[in-house]
Image (cartoon, rainbow, N blue to C red):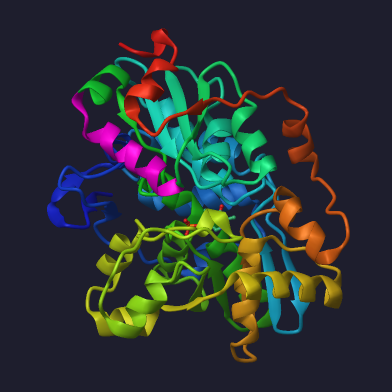
Amino acid sequence: MKFISTRNSSIQKNLSDGIQCGIAKDGGLFIPEKIPQIKLGEFNSEWSLDYFAEKLLRIYFEGDSLEKHLATICQKVFTFRVPLTEFNSNTFVLELFHGPTSSFKDFGARFLSECMTKLSVDYPVTILVATSGDTGSAVACAFYKKSHTNVIVLYPEGMISKRQEQQITCWDSNIIAFAVDGKFDDCQNLVKSAFKNNWWNERFNLNSANSINIGRLLPQITYYAQSSLKFYERYKKSAGYIIPTGNLGNATAAYFAKLMGFPIREIVLATNANKVLPDYLQTGDYQPRTSIETLANAMDVGNPSNLERLNYLFPAFELFKKNIRAFSVSDKNISDTIIKTYEQKKLIICPHTATAFFVRENLDSEPWIIVATADACKFNTIIEPLIKSQVSISPQLQILLEKPSQTRSVGNSLDDIKEHIPRSWIR
Ligand SMILES: *Cc1c(COP(=O)(O)O)cnc(C)c1O
């Protein structure tokens, strides 16, 4: 299969090259030249997740040098459970947070890491990521002690939860994390300027692990495909999905699953107070903004990168509107929803997942699957005062909390960061 740039279909790459480039040279994002169509009868929802992933992703890996490794990659990545639970008679929850860093980002980061380490490189690669909370830990954990790869994580000092910070700063060896004196947008801008800077590019052999990378997107199709099929077989009806959204990476994977032919009735997106997408749907005029801080920090995005892929899939605005619905949820509604869900069912949800629960209440009585993107225990300082009860720590988080960690504060400049990077990482 060939992958093309969203901006120019004559820029074509195979999958490995798409993964290694991250972004197309015209600034577009890689997307399959055609969304493959499946027959439902070829898939069995009872298969283990790793086997399901292998069958599904083989379509995208066909003809690529990574194809021979796909089974091994899937066996290494899809090792944790993805429960689909019933909340009430027409509301279900897909739990994507049972990976080692307790957010859905473990799927994409681990898959990308396994792919990248199978690809040959002339000299070590440096992965540079900006994180508003969960990407940094997922990427650090996924690449920890992988050969020929170093990872630099930038996060905004004081703007992520203590437990999120611990999950980012508890690594050593080939991982280094910096608390940047600035906001998430500043971290993102530092990454962008590093990629544009020849010295950084050449001396570090930079690559990105943000959700613009096609290697992060593809594995995420798996859990939508399998859960939709499972639901359809169990209830003889197709479910809709409500997805907490920031950079639209997770949502784009859901659209892939739907367009491939898996039984997904509809996809609805929940944003926090950063509402460029709902506003765009309302006005038809896209206005990116600087992000504002909310309780759901991993969704604090003012210019969602994967919108470019959704625009490619649904090029006319009318078509876009027909396929995409999005609602913005305030911090007040997030807090109220966390309290209400706990009081009603003793279910403790994270602030991101809460946006989807809130949106659910305003939808019809058809079956909806709420996508739970992170484990509540990462956000104890937000949740515990609300529900006036303790959030128990998951075993995965406990392991990381017990590791020694080191916070490195740096100024908001590439030169300052460079000073703190081990000399051996620089060519
Ligand atoms: C990253 C993240 C999101 C947003 O996902 P996108 O793919 O960026 O839209 C939602 N919830 C949590 C917990 C996250 O870590």
The chief SS type of the magenta part is: helix
- Residue at 59 percent across and 19 percent down: it is 172
Quadrant location of residue 418? Answer: top left
User: How many numbered circles are shown?
Assistant: 0
**162 left or right of 157 in image:** right
Say if 22 sits above or below 391 in the image. Answer: above
Say if 131 sits above or below 49 in the image. Answer: above
Q: Which residue of the protein is positioned furthest toward the bottom in this rendering?
A: 364
- As for residue 193 lying within the magenta part, the answer is yes
Q: Position of residue 13 (x, y in %)?
A: 21, 43
Q: Between residues 79 and 202, which one lies in front from this camera angle? A: 202
Quadrant location of residue 415? Answer: top left
Of the 4 image quadrants, the one containing the C terminus is: top left
Say if 192 sits above or below 390 in the image. Answer: above
Q: Is any part of residue 370 visible from this angle?
A: no
Q: Is any part of residue 312 visible from this angle?
A: yes
Q: Position of residue 197 (x, y in %)?
A: 22, 29
Q: Which residue of the protein is positioned furthest toward the right in this rendering?
A: 389
Q: Between residues 319 and 50, which one lies in front from this camera angle? A: 319
- As for residue 31 lying within the magenta part, the answer is no
Q: Position of residue 396 (x, y in %)?
A: 75, 39
- Residue at 46 percent across and 26 percent down: it is 151
**74 left or right of 276 in image:** right
Q: Position of residue 181 (x, y in %)?
A: 47, 36
- Residue at 68 percent across and 56 percent down: it is 82
Provide the residue span drawn in magenta. 184-198
- Residue at 37 percent across and 66 percent down: it is 37
Q: Which residue of the protein is positioned furthest toward the left in this rendering?
A: 10
Q: Which residue of the protein is positioned furthest toward the top in this rendering?
A: 424
Q: Between residues 390 and 222, which one lies in front from this camera angle? A: 390
